[in-house]
Amino acid sequence: MRRKMPQRKKNLPMSNLVLGVCGGIAAYKSAFLASGFSRKGFAVRTIMTSSAGKFITPLTFETLTGEIVYTDLFDKNRLENHTALARWADLAVVAPATATTMARMAAGFADELLSAFLLDFSGPVFLCPSMHGNMLKKPPVKHNISLLKERGYRFIGPVEGRLAGGDSGPGRMEEPERIIKEVESFLGRGSAESG
Ligand SMILES: Cc1cc2nc3c(=O)[nH]c(=O)nc-3n(C[C@H](O)[C@H](O)[C@H](O)COP(=O)(O)O)c2cc1C
């Protein structure tokens, strides 16, 4: 049976979006993001870290976006590599952004597909961190976040709220609808649904 692909608005500028998904418990929320951005007319290509694959499957994003999902820096069956994806993308959203991926970015690592893409890409990047509040307040994490801010990465969240394990506090990933609104507002778009 053929899948029904999301309908995309025609001729929208800045609408090629790479969604980076890392291995955090909030990875399930990225499915709502993928779906929401697609519904808003973005072409969404997802890059998942190998840890993200422990929380959610590529099939979920493939089905929701109608686009290939990228998981492997060394995939010989794909013509598109991290540099081709960086040329294709107008903007990138990393959600959830884990402590590990942000550390890789801060240190300039390119040892897996998402960080290699991010190192190559020159357009706007939105980071949506998610982690336990105890991790968030640790000096290396705080240092990496402020370094990335200084380098021009845009942060959405984290916010206070319920965390994994029944705790609550800062470190919760911002809600998908809010992330989409912030990205749209950055692009100077209204918040009308495309269908
Ligand atoms: C159940 C579970 C939940 C996790 N949630 C988070 C999280 O919310 N944020 C985070 O930074 N790391 C979290 N981790 C740890 C990451 O999965 C781990 O640091 C991993 O190396 C991240 O790799 P990535 O950044 O390449 O996706 C979690 C691990 C487990 C087992």
Image (cartoon, rainbow, N blue to C red):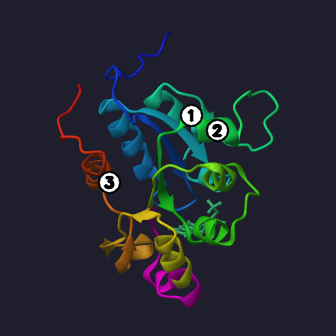
In front of the other: 17 or 173: 17
- Residue 128 in picture, x, y percent from top left: 43, 62
- Residue 143 in picture, x, y percent from top left: 54, 84
Kind of residue at disc 3 = Ile
- Residue 129 in picture, x, y percent from top left: 45, 67
Is residue 135 located in the magenta-colored stretch of the structure? yes
Pointer 1: what residue?
Answer: 88
The mark that comes first in sequence, 1 or 2, is 2
For the residues labelled 1 and 3, say whether their Cβ atoms are less than 8 Å apart. no
Determine the residue positioned at 23% across, 27% down: 194
Q: Which mark is residue 70?
A: 2
Task: Determine which quarter of the picture holds residue 109.
Answer: bottom right
Q: CA distance from mark 1 to mark 3?
A: 22 Å
Pointer 3: what residue?
Answer: 179
- The response on whether ligand 1 sits within 8 Å of label 2 is no
Determine the residue positioned at 53% across, 88% down: 138
- Residue placed furthest toward the top: 1
Q: CA distance from mark 2 to mark 3?
A: 22 Å
Kind of residue at disc 1 = Trp
Determine the residue positioned at 60% across, 37% down: 87
Q: Which mark is residue 103?
A: none
> In this picture, which residue range is highlighted in magenta?
128-142
Q: CA distance from mark 1 to mark 2?
A: 14 Å
- The response on whether ligand 1 sits within 8 Å of label 1 is no
